[in-house]
Amino acid sequence: MSLQCAHCYKTFSIAKVNDSRGKGLSVEVQCPHCAAWLGHNKLLSVAKLVGFYGGVGAAVLGYMVEGLSHITTPLIILAVIMVGLSHIMDHLQLIEAPENDPNLVSTAK
């Protein structure tokens, strides 16, 4: 799987990641090219998980309980839309720029 850095825009393999910090949904990885810290948006990751498990739960409930298909079918459709949109919008974001970045403008006087 190839990732693209949000800072230097170079692609790198997940196997080339040397350093990471955090656990679970708040995990961050360091770009091997520019040493910037990259991570995912936590709200979109939670929305993706809620949509997936909500859709699976609605599908199982609709299969098991007779007469609920008129309720569970729209829930499954909304869950698929929620997962799709959150997956499209969930890109790596720049969490912390490298310290020796010449592109950053110093605001200290």
Image (cartoon, rainbow, N blue to C red):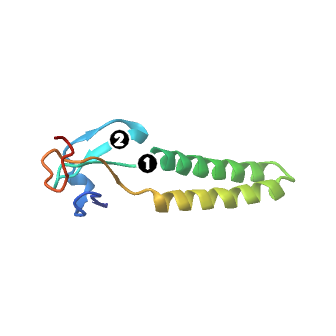
The residue tagged 1 is 41
Q: Residue furthest top?
A: 22
Give coordinates of residue 98: x percent, y percent: 18, 47
- Residue 4, by quadrant, is bottom left
| Label 1 crowd bin: few (<14), some (14–19), many (20+), radius 10 Å | some
Closest to the observer: 41 or 53? Answer: 41
Residue 23: x and y, percent? 36, 36
Q: Total of numbered circles in the picture?
A: 2
Looking at the image, residue 49 lies above or below residue 5: above
Q: Which residue lies at the image location 85% right of the left edge and 52% below the top edge?
A: 66
Furthest-right residue in this view:
67
Q: Is residue 29 toward the left or the right of residue 46 in the image?
A: left
Left or right: residue 33 versus residue 37 is: left
Give the alpha-carbon distance from disc 2 to disc 1, as whole Å: 10 Å
Which residue does the image show at 70% across and 53% down from the upper left? 59
Residue 97, given in percent of the width and then of the height, sits at: 23, 48
- Horizontal relation, residue 91 to residue 29: left or right: right
**For the point 83% across and 58% down, which residue is it?**
70
Check disc 2: other Cα within 10 Å, few if <14, some if 14-19, many if 20+: few
Q: Quadrant of the N terminus?
A: bottom left
Q: Nearer the viewer, residue 73 or 66?
A: 73
Q: Which mark is residue 20?
A: none
37 lies above or below 72: above
Residue type at the position of mark 2: Val
Please report the residue visible at 55 percent of the width from the left and 49 percent of the height from the top. Answer: 47
Q: Which mark, residue 27?
A: 2
Q: Nearer the viewer, mark 2 or mark 1?
A: 1
Q: Is residue 90 left or right of residue 65?
A: left
Question: Percent x, y for residue 15?
Answer: 23, 53
Q: Quadrant of the C terminus?
A: top left
Find numbered disc 2 in the image and state the secondary structure of the residue it sits on: loop
